[in-house]
Image (tube, rainbow, N blue to C red):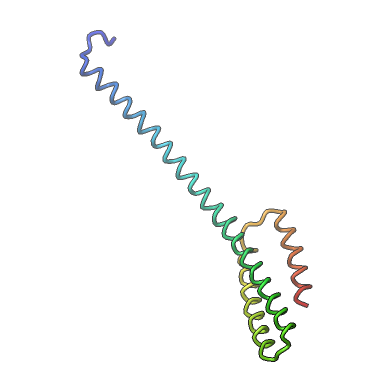
């Protein structure tokens, strides 16, 4: 079939086939990269940001404990008022971050932990 075909024509056919093959493989590669990028964005939005919020909640709870300890140690009206203001401010931020966290997608294990945490936090506040 290709015996009487010129070398120029054979090279053109081969080069065209290789270019089409490379474009096809490249397209599949770009599609895969885009899909993995979207998956990583989901992981970032649903897992990493809420984990960071939980870390912030932990820090604010620790600051509340420190402010309370400081007020108990110094037993000064001014120090107590400062501690109370700080605790109220931190508690408002904790509530905001907690509502943001529970609004994200939670796996069943996390839902159970959230229920436990809410009960413990309610007892802590009373």
Q: In the image, 79: left or right of 20?
A: right
- Vertical arrangement, residue 17 with respect to residue 67, above or below: above
Q: Which residue does the image show at 38% across and 32% down from the upper left?
A: 24
Relative placement, left or right, of 71 versus 23 is: right
Q: Is residue 76 above or below residue 94?
A: below
Viewer-closest of 69 and 105: 69
Horizontal and vertical percent position of residue 25: 40, 32
| Nearer to me, 37 or 60 | 60
Image position, residue 33 (x, y; %)? 45, 42
Q: Name the residue at 76% across, 72% down.
A: 122
Residue 12: name its quadrant: top left
Query: How many marks on residues?
Result: 0
For the N terminus, the image quarter is top left
Q: Residue at x 35, y 33 (%)?
A: 23
Compared with 8, 63 (above or below) is below
**Quarter of the figure with the C terminus:** bottom right
Would residue 79 appear left or right of 22 to someone viewing this image?
right
Q: Nearer the viewer, residue 89 or 45?
A: 89
The x and y percentages for residue 91 are 66, 76
Name of the residue lying farthest toward the bottom: 77
**Residue 107 location (% of width, % of height):** 68, 53
Q: Residue 3 sits in which quadrant? A: top left
The residue depicted at 71 percent of the width and 54 percent of the height is 108
Identify the residue at the far top of this view: 3
């Amino acid at each position: 079939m290709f015996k009487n075909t010129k070398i120029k024509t054979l090279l053109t056919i081969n080069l065209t086939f290789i270019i089409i093959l490379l474009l096809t493989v490249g397209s599949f590669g770009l599609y895969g990269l885009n899909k993995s990028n979207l998956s990583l964005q989901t992981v970032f939005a649903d897992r990493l940001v809420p984990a960071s919020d939980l870390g912030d909640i932990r820090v604010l709870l620790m600051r509340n404990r420190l402010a309370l300890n400081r007020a108990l140690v110094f037993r000064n009206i001014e120090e107590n008022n400062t501690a109370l203001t700080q605790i109220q401010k931190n508690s408002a931020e904790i509530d905001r971050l907690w509502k943001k966290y529970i609004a994200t997608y939670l796996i069943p294990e996390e839902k159970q932990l959230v229920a436990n945490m809410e009960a413990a936090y309610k007892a802590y506040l009373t």
